[in-house]
Amino acid sequence: MKLKGKVAVVTGSSTGNGAAIAKAFAREGADVVVHYNRSSEQAEKVVRAIRKEGRESFAVKADLSAPPENKAMFRQVKRRLGRVDVLVNNAGLADGGIWNAPIESLTRDMWLKVFSVDVFGAFDCVQNALPMMPKGSAIVNVSSTPALAGDTQGIVYGCGKGAVLTMTKMLAKSLAPKVRVNCMVLGSIKTGWLQWFGEDQVEALRSWIPLKRFGEPEDVAHLAVFLASADSAFMTGQGLVLDGGEVVD
């Protein structure tokens, strides 16, 4: 087991990629804190799945854009588990209206809405977890391929994920050698965002990917396990692209 005896906090882990990561961590031996904001029923399902693996788990509700709630979540983690060996900053704001909005209609509030979760919330998680992180711990952030290659839509989202990628590099140098910090740069993964598009658009997106399929949350989970474990012990400050070849540099 690659994460035996570890304690992991996975934000946004009630559904999608986060849920897959949390379950994969449990299979690899970790106790996992399941964070959610709205999906309490789904979060409890993930907790039950983790406990079936013989690992400890509990769900915590927190709006990560609100610093007091973010801090309270980690107080609960400290009280119940005592430390954090792995932090996965997976939570992000998904808003099809902001993604599809034309540039001329974007507002400062839209930018703040996205950045308050994707960037500020992720950094607050790092600050709150660090006092509990022993030497050899790992932070895994989540960015997206528009941060590397641009896109015709989603400028606010792409800029937020670009900030996460830069934050990864800055934290990696600042926290070394105690804590490793890496980032998953995700392409088109089959989660809820596909509902923003019509059937023809979805098929066009799929055909653009060289491997001719969307990624699955389990693909993301495999990469997260690698970055959280000793398999990547000599790696920090990196953005690993998982996109089926969609962005070929």
Image (cartoon, helix red, strand yellow):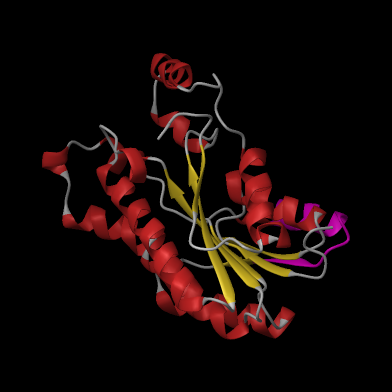
Q: Quadrant of the N terminus?
A: bottom right
Q: Residue placed farthest to the left in the image?
A: 104
Q: Quadrant of the C terminus?
A: top left
Please state the horizontal and vertical placement of residue 142, each as a whole percent of the image. Answer: 49, 53
Judged left or right of residue 106, residue 77 is right
Q: Specify whether residue 159 is in view.
A: yes
Judged left or right of residue 209, residue 129 is right
How many marks are shown on the rendered structure?
Answer: 0
Residue 239 to residue 126: above or below: above
Q: Specify whether residue 65 is in view.
A: no
As for residue 221 lying within the magenta part, the answer is no
Q: Give the magenta range.
A: 44-59
Residue drawn 73% across and 56% down? Answer: 25
Task: Examine the image and state in which quarter residue 211 appears.
Answer: top right
Closer to us: 180 or 70: 180
Residue drawn 66% across and 81% down? Answer: 134
Please state the horizontal and vertical placement of residue 221, each as a whole percent of the image. Answer: 66, 47
Please state the horizontal and vertical placement of residue 7, each as a whole percent of the image. Answer: 72, 71
Task: Examine the image and state in which quarter residue 246 appears.
Answer: top left
Closer to us: 22 or 199: 22
